[in-house]
């Protein structure tokens, strides 16, 4: 099992460019999450998908959109990138219905917006 | 929103014990977690504790939970250089939208040889 995979690993964008971050999990989890990590601020939830076909805003959704393409895949799109979106982005998945809500994380995408 | 707070840095010598502390505000937290992040990698779950427990031990790791004071700690015995990483405390509560986790800012543990 690969667990949670993310592409790309690194990306540099110019202000105003768009891009999509891809995430896939092979653990048959219902729930998937997108977080951003900034120094000293821990991880902040951008969007989540509690189950296939549903998506909801997290703590910091502005400037992002998501698509839960199927049970395995959950993508994050930046329509018009801004320097404030320079961050490390993590995708995670969990089988929340089982109680402990252990979340499994991908290796991250390091995004720089110039 | 609910808060989870940790100190930013901890430095210890190899072989000593490390204690990383965390405070949280959500009294309805059901599970509390410790995640480890090594340089350039994602987060990996180290251990978790259910809110009706006071302590959990797992090899070199001991988690203590003081629910009254909303204080969680992670003790690493016989700390090794391979334990150098950022450690995140997180909590899960029934009223968290989508069963999301609320993370602290992370404590960077530096282990000196």
Image (cartoon, coloured by chain):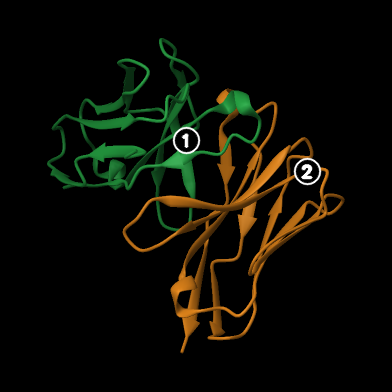
Chain colours: A green, B orange
Q: Which mark is residue B51?
A: 2
The residue that disc 1 covers is A45
Q: Nearer the viewer, residue B105 or B109?
A: B109
Query: Is A99 drawn above or below residue A108 in the view shown?
Result: above
Q: What is the secondary structure assignment of the residue under circle 1?
A: strand
Q: Which mark is residue B2?
A: none
Chain at numbered mark 2: B
Question: In which image quadrant can residue B71 be found?
Answer: bottom right
How many other residues sit within 10 Å of disc 1, few (<14), some (14-19) or many (≥20)?
A: many
Q: Nearer the viewer, residue A36 or A14?
A: A36
Q: Where does the image place residue A4, in percent across and percent down from the top left?
A: 35, 38
Residue depicted at 65% across the width and 45% down the height: B3
Q: What is the secondary structure assignment of the residue under circle 2?
A: loop
Q: Where does the image place residue A69, in percent across and percent down from the top left?
A: 30, 16
Kindly report the distance in space between the C-alpha atoms of the residues bearing marks 1 and 2: 23 Å
Question: In which image quadrant can residue B81 be found?
Answer: bottom left
Q: Quadrant of the image for the N terminus of chain A? A: top left
Numbered marks: total: 2
Callout in the foreground (1, 2): 2
Chain at numbered mark 1: A
Q: Where does the image place residue B112, in percent across and percent down from the top left?
A: 47, 86
Residue depicted at 32% across the width and 27% down the height: A64
Q: Is residue B95 left or right of residue B69?
A: left
Residue found at the very far front of the displayed protein: A1
Residue found at the very far right of the displayed protein: B68
């Amino acid at each position: 099992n690969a667990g949670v995979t993310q592409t790309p690993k690194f990306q540099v964008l110019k202000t105003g460019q768009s891009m999509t971050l891809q995430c896939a999990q092979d653990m048959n989890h219902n729930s998937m999450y997108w977080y951003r990590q900034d120094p000293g601020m821990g991880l902040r939830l951008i969007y989540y998908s509690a189950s296939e076909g549903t998506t909801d805003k997290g703590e910091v959704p502005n400037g992002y959109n998501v698509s839960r393409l199927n049970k395995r895949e959950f993508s994050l799109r930046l329509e018009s990138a801004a320097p404030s979106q320079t961050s490390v982005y993590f995708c995670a998945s969990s089988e929340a219905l089982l109680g402990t809500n252990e979340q499994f994380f991908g290796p991250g995408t390091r995004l720089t917006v110039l | 929103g609910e808060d989870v707070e940790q100190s930013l840095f901890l430095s210890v010598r190899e072989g000593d014990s490390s204690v990383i502390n965390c405070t949280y505000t959500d009294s309805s937290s059901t599970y509390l977690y410790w995640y480890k992040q090594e340089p350039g990698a994602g987060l990996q779950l180290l251990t978790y504790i259910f809110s009706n427990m006071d302590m959990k031990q797992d090899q070199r790791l001991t988690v203590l939970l003081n629910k009254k004071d909303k204080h969680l700690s992670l003790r690493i015995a016989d700390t090794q250089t391979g334990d150098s990483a950022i450690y995140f405390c997180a909590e899960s509560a029934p009223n968290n939208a989508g069963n999301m986790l609320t993370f602290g800012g992370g404590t960077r543990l530096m282990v000196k040889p």
